[in-house]
Amino acid sequence: MKKIFFLLILAGTCLQLRSQELTISGYTRADGFVGVIDKNAPTLKSLYSETSLKLKAKAGIHGQAYTDIRFRTGSEYGSDFSTLNIREAYIDLYLGKVDFRIGKQISPWGRADGWNPTDNLTPSDYFVRSPDHDDMRLGNYRIRGQYNPLTWLKLEADLVPWYTPSVYRFDQVEMPSFVTINPPAHPGFQWDKTSVAGKADLIFTGIEGSVSWFQGYDPLPVLVPGVLPAPPFTDFKLELNQVPFRQHTLGADFATVILGTGFRGEFAWKMPEKGDNLDAWIPNSEIQWVLSVDREFGPVRIIAGYMGKVVQNFLPADPPQTFDPAMISNPEVWPLLGSMLASQIGYYNRILYDQTHEWNHSILFRPSVTLFHENLDLEISGLYNFTTGEYLIYPKATWHLTDGLLATAGYQYYEGDAYTRFSWIKNAFNGPFFEFRLIF
Amino acid sequence: MKKSIIILLFSVLSGALMAQAPMNPKDIMKKSRDQSKLSGLESKTTLEINDGKGNQRLRVTTMVSKIFPDGTEKRAILFLSPADVKGTGILIWDNEGKEDNMWIYMPALRKSRKIVSSEKSKNFMGSEFSNADLTVGNTDDFTYELIGAETVDKESCWKIKIKPVNSQIATENGISEKTTWISQKDFMPRKTLFLDPEGNPWKEMSYSGIKLMDAKTGKYFISEMVIRNLKNGRFSKMNMTDMVYNPSVKDDYFTLSYIEKQ
């Protein structure tokens, strides 16, 4: 009797699932990243396996639920780990011309290639090891409403009640030994400090674009010194905190196709909120613009992009001199210590937000080709910053062994002078990688 | 009564004579093109890609299309399999006399991207079909010559030689010429032979499963196409099922929101 009852429940559940159109998809992959800091002694930076389970349940025309659960195990940056991460879990509600998406989600903004300065809603994990660029994006709890009053007009409003910071692994960055950087502090929940954003998308036959506004916490926290050490500095240590700050961004973007060439652009005017005790550390206002083009030449596709930026109220500063904790045994230095440390930390923040120069110009070039009846994808990404001299070379090849089974190999090479972002990350990233992935 | 019979006989005879008389080949092609343009359609497509060595790959999509009052034909294509492209959506606005609009939504990108319409000569999804083979095309881009009549699949056909009007169109389509066999009964194609840019036989496409979708307007649909590469033995087969002729298909299907929600 019990067995029959159980079967009845199971049958009922299956029927219910079928009526809701439950689909399960995802992938399992095995990845390896080798670090080549010293050519004669390559190290293993990351070796892991990951399974992603994506569940989608549809409730007819009224909505759907989506969840992406990721199980990851392996070793990375010298430590073993096994994690379970619910990357996204949200509900979509379709109410005629109005749609809502509520829950942890990733919904990036911006039409340009390479850089999206209008996207302030999506935090990033800048140190994730994956050949898939999307893995850098982190989900955050968000309430998104979209209203389509006309076929060519879409209005969007977003609320992010709970702050999720971007991840920057300072433990992987070469820092003075006396510096400790604490995990990001959380501002807590305050209704009047909820991050809000709005966007109007206009989609015409020949051209499309949007204007947008963001007001809230910047995804990347700023570095702020903790309690400064006091004389006589017998055991000199400096703690830095990652503290979120608020900013406003006015943005716009566009995309069009003219004579077989795609043109995309993006503009953002970011204005950090001043007036509290973070003023000395938060970045200056800045205006950023991006223009990218893409075109196909037979099997070859080329994407090229330019990014420019100007920092407002810019005050020049030289990179700080190397700070030697031994010199603080000299009491004459003590009165100068505060300003020396402030200068050093201030410059770190300038590096973090690309504000070491008043004007900044970068280019991106990405040719790619698909060969052998779409079985082999080859691409190489190159990025060069004319202002700082930093550059990236990133070739990648993906072989489609069969439908859904892919083998990828590539190499990341970042280079930059001291006191640049690429010099910070090159030891963590430079080297070859491979991935085998089965998508189901 | 006699008068009516005479009129009826006359119209039947004239219809039969019309079908057999050598028509202007461009008009034949135009009629063939026009009657395959459906005002609204929903269908599921299975694409088999065979490498000629026994290996096969499958692509399954659903498609909705509609011709709008201004002449724009809009299509929304959603990929159902294989798993690595599942969830991808393509929206095409085929504008009359203007550059087409095309967007792609890929789950990994998480946003729709306005893209350059794929080149006509490019292979469709790694198959032997080119994009040009699967679109109705503009009749003014080619010249037409009626070179005879032959029977294909027990069907009397006009044999028409088709050449691009200039080298640019030839390059865009990736061919030097093609010959097509059009049924004298229903004006739908039964076979097409493509010559490569050097003038050598390259691909042969055969059409079957031709269905009359709307008797009132005389609209037809080809539900099965097989294309063979005569040089390397590869062949691909496209099979349309679950076809619904629906001129009142919802306008909402042809929006970015629709392809993003799938």
Image (cartoon, coloured by chain):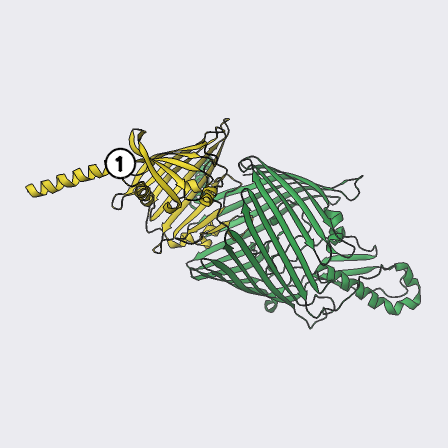
Chain colours: A green, B yellow
Residue farthest along the top direction in this orientation: B53
A259, A282: nearer the viewer: A259
Q: Which residue is mark 1?
A: B185
Tell me the residue at 25%/43% (across/down).
B215
In the image, A195: left or right of A127?
Answer: left
Residue drawn at x 51%, y 56% is A256
Q: Chain of mark 1?
A: B
Judging depth in this view, the residue of B151 and A389 nearest the camera is B151
Image quarter in which the C terminus of chain A is found? top right
Quarter-wise, where is residue A45 in the image? top right
**B262 above or below B158?**
below
Apparent side of residue A381 relative to residue A208 in the rendered image (left or right): right
**How far across and how far down the image is residue A295, in percent?**
55, 49
**Is residue A189 shown to the viewer in this render?**
no
Where residue B213 appears, as percent x and y from the top left, is: 30, 42
Q: Is residue A235 above or below residue B89?
A: below
Percent coordinates x, y for residue B192 in the rendering? 38, 34
**Who is closer to the viewer here, A367 or A431?**
A367
Residue A281 lies in quadrant: bottom right
- State left or right for residue A276 relative to residue B262: right
The reply to whether residue A314 is visible in this rendering is yes
Disc 1: CA contacts within 10 A as few (<14), some (14-19) or many (>=20): few
Image quadrant containing the N terminus of chain A:
top left
Left or right, A419 with respect to A15, comes to right
Q: For numbered disc 1, what is the local secondary structure?
A: loop
Q: Residue at x 58, y 46 (%)?
A: A69
| Image spot of residue A359 (x, y percent) | 69, 63
Number of dots carrying numbers: 1
Amino acid residing under circle 1: Lys
